[in-house]
């Protein structure tokens, strides 16, 4: 075990020679403190040496980082011995896996619990900020950006596994559950503080608010698919309906009215789609919703009714403007886009509260019953038709609201944003994050919309890596990253 | 209390129930027996409003209920404990029971839940566990408890002893007797004719979608035709 722990360290020392001639792990001398390969490896090595339970997680992290590093160096045509050494170290650490179950930690007193939650969420925001900025925003600023990002992911993965091995994650989840209101407030404040971190640049704020829009949409889909179990393959159409409604009204009415109109229109169409699907189940429902998504897409493409601009899209949508301030401009020290980010954070927060309350309500229980066994749900007196339409209504309204924000934020709405692949990505976000869980959809959406952005420099291999990541997640967390 | 007259139910072109008639008096245990595919389960599903009859009528206290949707039949006082338990296996014991009380809005739900736990202590001890983790017998107890939660006047059991051990069968039958002693009326479908008819006040034999024989439970048990066909 000690050998295993030493190997990652050895790999950074072994190559020797004039830097960076013997291109090895040292090649990536940490330009961004935490993103340096060496630091990660040594950190994980120390972690593994000191804490027995963290051995396997550290091994996984080392192996991932070593693989990323090797792949990258081979890609550069400069393979080295550091990588294989580190990989061997990682595998060695993983080898005799410790199978003892995670210990159960006692819940602390309320004051301590709150402090812990505060620290935990602050750390989470820092982590999000670092994850966003790891490797810089483009190839121009940092040629090794993608590799650095992947290596950072390896580190985060290892730390998460280690925390979980010590039962800390479950403990935190229990604390969050117990002090639900406090945890939620802290989380909201921390999320709103993101513009003050390293990620507080116009670019990252734009990325983060786009993620926010999709996260809110994914939460809506989570109500339909995760809670009520209705597989909807055309869901992105509701985002589009909200967006086009707001885009058409943007010059006429202020944002809140446009947003309400978008929400209402999407809701009405949600019922229109929901009603005829009451008699179909499972695969057939998926086909009907798929068809609806396609009808919407084609209608928007051909500018039916002159409402969507067709191939020209609808340009020149004014930004949200309140109190005489346009939301796309910087505000004081805050970079441009921060206000949109704040809007999406609030929207996601509202959606989360709604999801939690629905889930534990009588309606939520009825949905769960329908999801598990529709016939018996009927025998228990659940009005299945009404419950299903309600799920469609709530879900599509959520997407409609997100669509209205989406339209104002982008300034241009075109039909291409709402094709089938977007529905699939949203569905993947829900499934990956964890069906029916509250943070699941947010985690899933963040992952699915950050990963492609971050893997941009692997252009050719991007989709392949993306697919690989999805397969790995489903292999090791079949019930989603955040399972209930 | 319940009167079924000349009931016929079809799945598409196939008429599973052709001519079924029976009555259930208040406070009785009534049992329908018959071979596989005789139409027993279909009859119960039709009574509870999950299926629509093609002909015939179902009267509850003289009021026709065969056109009512399932939730209205339940609200009228008929609960259905379906074949094969059909629990919500991903939910906890408590959530299953709450779903049984889905239509109720009164404040006595907690008290009724306590009553179920009293009747089946094992459920009370494991109230937060997933129903899917339970043994067959425990699942049947939960299914019975779930049906009780609706406070029905009439509980219908579809093969409550299916796949259970002899000891468990005995226990379930005892529970059904207890329910009756507490004032419930029971309509039961069983393949285990011996256990069912021993308990039943009144029995009906259904064969190929028709009620062919009827009589008090012990009398049917003694009937040579029943003996030959179902008790062997």
Image: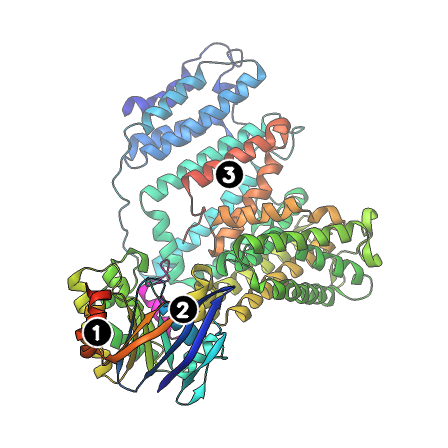
Q: Are marks 1 and 3 on the same chain?
A: no
Q: Residue B42, labelled with which disc?
A: 2
Residue B99 in magenta stretch: yes
Q: CA distance from mark 1 to mark 3?
A: 57 Å
Q: Quadrant of residue A54?
A: top left
Q: Residue B197, labelled with which disc?
A: 1
Residue in the image at 58% along x and 67% along y: A389
Secondary-structure class at tag 3: helix
Mark nearer the viewer, 2 or 3: 2
Q: Residue A470, labelled with which disc?
A: 3
The reply to whether the C-beta atoms of the residues labelled 1 and 2 are less than 8 Å apart is no
* Chain letter of the residue beneath label 3 in the structure image: A
Between A3 and A335, which is closer to the camera in this rendering?
A3
Vertical order, A208 against A275 (above or below): above
Q: Quadrant of residue A198?
A: top right
Indicate the position of residue A189 as horizontal and vertical percent values.
53, 57
Query: What is the number of callouts on the image?
Result: 3
Residue A213 in magenta stretch: no
Indicate the position of residue A106 as horizontal and vertical percent values.
27, 55
Secondary-structure class at tag 2: helix
Q: Residue A86, labelled with which disc?
A: none
Secondary-structure class at tag 1: helix
The reply to whether the C-beta atoms of the residues labelled 2 and 3 are less than 8 Å apart is no
Specify the farthest residue to the left. B167
Mark nearer the viewer, 1 or 3: 1
Query: Looking at the image, can residue A33 be seen?
Result: no
Q: Which residues are magenta?
A: B86-104
Residue in the image at 30% along x and 21% along y: A3
Label 3 neighbour load within 10 Å: few <14, some 14-19, many 20+: some
Q: Quadrant of residue A15?
A: top left
Q: Are marks 2 and 3 on the same chain?
A: no
Between B66 and A477, which is closer to the camera in this rendering?
B66
């Amino acid at each position: 075990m000690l050998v295993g722990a030493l190997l990652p360290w050895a790999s950074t020392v072994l190559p020797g020679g004039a830097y960076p001639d013997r291109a090895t792990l040292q090649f990536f001398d940490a330009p961004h403190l935490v993103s340096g390969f060496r630091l990660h490896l040594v950190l994980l090595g120390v972690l593994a040496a000191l804490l027995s339970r963290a051995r396997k997680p550290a091994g996984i992290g080392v192996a991932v980082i070593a693989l990323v590093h090797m792949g990258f160096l081979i890609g550069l045509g400069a393979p080295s011995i550091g990588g294989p050494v580190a990989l061997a170290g990682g595998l060695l650490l993983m080898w005799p896996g410790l199978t003892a179950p995670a210990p159960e930690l006692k819940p602390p007193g309320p004051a301590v619990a709150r402090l812990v939650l505060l620290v935990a969420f602050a750390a989470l925001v820092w982590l999000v900020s670092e994850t966003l900025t790891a490797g810089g925003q483009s190839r121009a600023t940092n040629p090794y950006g993608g590799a650095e990002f992947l290596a950072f992911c390896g580190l985060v993965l290892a730390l998460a596994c280690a925390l979980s091995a010590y039962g800390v994650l479950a403990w935190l989840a229990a604390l969050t559950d117990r002090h639900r209101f406090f945890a939620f407030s802290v989380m909201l404040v921390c999320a709103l503080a993101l513009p003050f971190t390293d990620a507080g640049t116009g670019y990252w704020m734009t990325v983060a608010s786009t993620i926010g829009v999709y996260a809110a949409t994914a939460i809506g889909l989570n109500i339909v698919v995760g809670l009520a179990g209705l597989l909807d393959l055309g869901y992105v159409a509701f985002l589009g309906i909200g967006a086009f409604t707001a885009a058409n009204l943007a010059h006429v009415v202020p944002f809140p009215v446009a947003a309400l109109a978008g929400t209402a229109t999407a809701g009405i169409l949600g019922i229109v789609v929901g009603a005829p699907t009451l008699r179909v189940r499972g695969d057939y429902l998926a086909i009907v919703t798929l068809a609806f998504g396609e009808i919407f897409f084609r209608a928007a493409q051909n500018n039916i009714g002159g409402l969507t601009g067709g191939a020209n899209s609808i340009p020149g949508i004014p930004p949200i403007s309140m109190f005489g301030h346009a939301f796309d401009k910087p505000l004081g020290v805050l970079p441009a886009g921060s206000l949109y980010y704040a809007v999406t954070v609030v929207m996601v927060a509202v959606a989360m509260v709604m999801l939690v309350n629905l889930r534990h309500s009588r309606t939520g229980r009825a949905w769960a019953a329908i999801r598990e066994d529709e016939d018996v749900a009927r025998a228990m007196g659940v009005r299945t038709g009404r419950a299903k339409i309600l799920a469609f209504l709530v879900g599509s309204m959520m997407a409609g609201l997100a669509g209205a924000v989406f339209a104002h934020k982008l300034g241009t709405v075109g039909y291409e944003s709402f094709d089938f692949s977007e529905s699939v990505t949203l569905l993947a976000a829900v499934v990956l994050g964890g069906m029916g869980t509250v943070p699941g959809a947010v985690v899933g959406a963040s992952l699915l919309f950050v990963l492609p952005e971050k893997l941009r420099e692997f252009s050719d291999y991007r989709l392949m890596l993306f697919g690989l990541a999805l397969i790995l997640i489903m292999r090791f967390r079949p019930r989603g990253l955040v399972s209930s | 209390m319940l009167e079924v007259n000349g009931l016929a139910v079809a799945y598409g072109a196939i008429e599973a129930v052709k001519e079924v008639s029976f009555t259930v008096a208040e406070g009785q245990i009534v049992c329908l027996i018959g071979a596989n595919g005789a139409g027993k389960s279909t009859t119960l599903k039709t009574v509870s409003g999950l299926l629509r009859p093609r002909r015939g009528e179902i009267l509850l206290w003289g009021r026709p209920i065969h056109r009512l949707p399932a939730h209205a039949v339940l609200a009228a006082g008929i609960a259905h404990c379906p074949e094969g338990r059909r629990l919500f296996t991903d939910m906890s014991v408590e959530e299953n029971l709450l779903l049984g009380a889905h239509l109720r809005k009164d404040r006595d739900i907690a008290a009724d839940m306590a009553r179920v736990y009293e009747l089946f202590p094992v459920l009370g001890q494991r109230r937060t566990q997933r129903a899917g983790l339970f043994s067959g017998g425990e699942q049947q107890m939960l299914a019975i408890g779930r049906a009780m939660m609706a406070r029905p006047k009439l509980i219908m059991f579809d093969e409550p002893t299916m796949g259970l051990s002899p000891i468990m069968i005995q226990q379930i039958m005892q529970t059904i007797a207890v329910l009756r002693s507490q004032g419930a009326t029971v309509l039961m479908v069983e393949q285990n004719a011996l256990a069912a008819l021993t308990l039943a006040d009144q029995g009906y034999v259904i064969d190929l979608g028709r009620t062919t024989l009827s009589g008090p439970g012990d009398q049917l048990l003694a009937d040579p035709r029943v003996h030959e066909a179902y008790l062997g």
